[in-house]
Amino acid sequence: MFYKGNPVSKGIALGKVYVYKPYTPEITEKTFEPFRIDEYLQRYKDTKASAEMELQRIHALLSDKDPEKAKIFAAHIDIVNDVAITEEIMDAIQYDHFEPDYAIETVFSKYIKMISKSKDPVIRERAADFQDVKNRLIRNWHGIEESNLSTLSEPVVVAAYDLLPSDTAALDRKNVIAIITETGSFTSHSAIIARSYEIPAILGIPSLMSFIRHGEEVIVDAISGDLITEPGKEQIEQYTLMRSQYIKKVRESKEYLDKEPLTKDGVRIDIGLNIGSGNDEEIGHSQFSDFVGLFRTEFLYMSGDSMPTEEQQFEVYKNVLSGFKDKPVYLRTLDIGADKTLPYLDLPKEENPFLGCRGLRLCFDQINIFKTQLRAALRASVFGKLCIMLPMVSCIEDIRSANAIIEEVKSELSEIGIPFDSNVKIGVMIEVPSAALIADMIAKEVDFASIGTNDLCQYITAADRLNPKVTQYYQSYHPALFRLIDYIVSSFNKAGKPISVCGELGGDPQAIPVLVGLGLRRLSMSSSAVASAKAVLSNFTMDQMKEMAQQVKMLPASEDVIEYLVKTQNIKE
């Protein structure tokens, strides 16, 4: 059977399906007859032992490859074995005759409520750990196997309704050979992660979860967007060959990886990296790039069960800045909201979250979180070339308010004698039309800017980039987007201020000549796109790219732009 979706990360995979459904317990008040006390006490002990074994196994797996995550699970083991909690649960079973799952829910909820009210933010953050342990115990009581993407036992095709950033942050990269989801688009965060990890992915497959079966064999053609279930022998042979040919093609383009990014007539275009975790692998790509155009710090917040402390953030930022040495690192401050949430941060439900309290707006609302991140970043600035980038800026007032807070944090650090780079550059993401249309004025207020094409396209076309019903309206090649980029780039070039692109368009081989033709000399992208970007640049002169940019701006529709670019670049999959 053939099913269509949006191919958001190219490649071909053949393998077994792993249906991922995050466990969410639904507990009601339940009691039992007294004669079952001994039975339920023993079953609770067995449940507790089973949960502890799971945690021990995860802790052992993470101890070598990710010690920081291992610490989280060590803390969870301590909570499972907490004497006071264990006694209270067993008392609720023995004397109140609560069924164990209801006893677990009741006791843990009391502790979670108590911890959440603490004045100490570090203690408050522990509430998420207790919530996680509670869910694990209840799941074990019901005999439900763990569904976890961080510790997969074999290579699988992950199938899900959606993958949240918190799911992808813990992805077991070695064993995820492809991703298929029912929702999502080219610019959703699961798509971005898939591309950065070079995992084939098809998103937005209608009704996927109603027909996909756990363990069945499938073919994922993330070039054409085809999902094939129940493949025959001939199809398996055909796609095995296609996969080999595709891998060969990718390997050939990677020959450009360590080459200088030059156009055909020798003009240098700086190539930057979009990074998330700041791990050694990401830092290792520094040798093939000129800067970090986007350090997505929210992944540091989403990879754990509690808010990262100032020290934890400082160590990560220090590691990245030291790793990239004299190359600029553009650290985007916390960009949470809309499709990115934190399980331990209770945010109010919004009717239109993409238009709501997100990015810098959330930082203004949660000022202590913002200042903690700024302190950590400024402390780390002495170890490299830090640039602070503010997301979701919509007006000049946003910039001035943020600058005031940054100056306040600098003063606090100075008062206690903590060193930092006093000349840290401050800039903005231009991803809101109101900011784009006053780019000339913004250029006077900041040291630099980067164009976030994912959200800018979403707001220009008035199309939710995660809503499959309006996918046809979210047009990455809309002439209006290129016209607006032209204005932004022109405004910053006239002001003599650095301007770059860090959205997905920046690493798109089809769009790169147009962006350079519009005047951009700095492009930031996932590490997987660097080699092909350099290869594309080597094929065109500056005059050719300027001509392409002018033509694109004059075309009336997205489909006309795509047709023109395919014809001009002779693109073949």
Image (cartoon, rainbow, N blue to C red):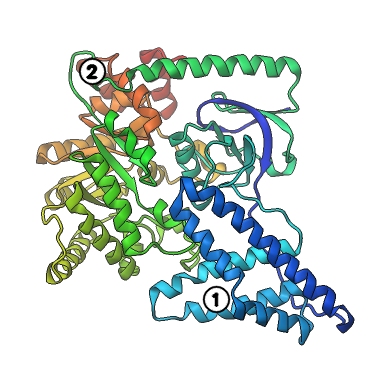
Would you place residue 336 above or below residue 124 in this image?
above
Crowding around mark 2 (Cα neighbors within 10 Å: few <14, some 14 to 19, many 20+) is: many
Task: State whether residue 303 appears in this view.
Answer: no
Q: Residue at x 18, y 16 (%)?
A: 266
- Quadrant of residue 177 within the rendered picture: top right
* Residue 418 horizontal side relative to residue 150, left or right: left
Quarter in which the N terminus is drawn: top right
Q: Are marks 2 and 1 in contact (CB under 8 Å)?
A: no
Q: Nearer the viewer, residue 447 or 432?
A: 447
* Residue 214 horizontal side relative to residue 241, left or right: right
Crowding around mark 1 (Cα neighbors within 10 Å: few <14, some 14 to 19, many 20+) is: some
* Residue 431 horizontal side relative to residue 117, left or right: left
Dot 1: element: helix
Dot 2: element: loop
Label 2 – label 1 distance at C-alpha? 58 Å
In percent of width and height, residue 344 lies at 48, 66
Residue 112: mark in rendering: 1
Give the amino acid at mark 1.
Ile
Q: Residue at x 56, y 16 (%)?
A: 244
Give the amino acid at mark 2.
Thr
Tag 1 or tag 2, which sits nearer the N-term? 1
* Residue 457 horizontal side relative to residue 24, left or right: left
In percent of width and height, residue 537 lies at 28, 19
> Hey, which residue is sitting farthest right in the picture?
35
In percent of width and height, residue 92 lies at 72, 83
Q: Nearer the viewer, residue 390 or 89?
A: 89
- Quadrant of residue 44 within the rendered picture: bottom right
Q: Residue at x 35, y 23 (%)?
A: 531
Q: Which residue is mark 2?
A: 263
Would you place residue 248 above or below residue 452 in this image?
above
In percent of width and height, residue 523 lies at 27, 33
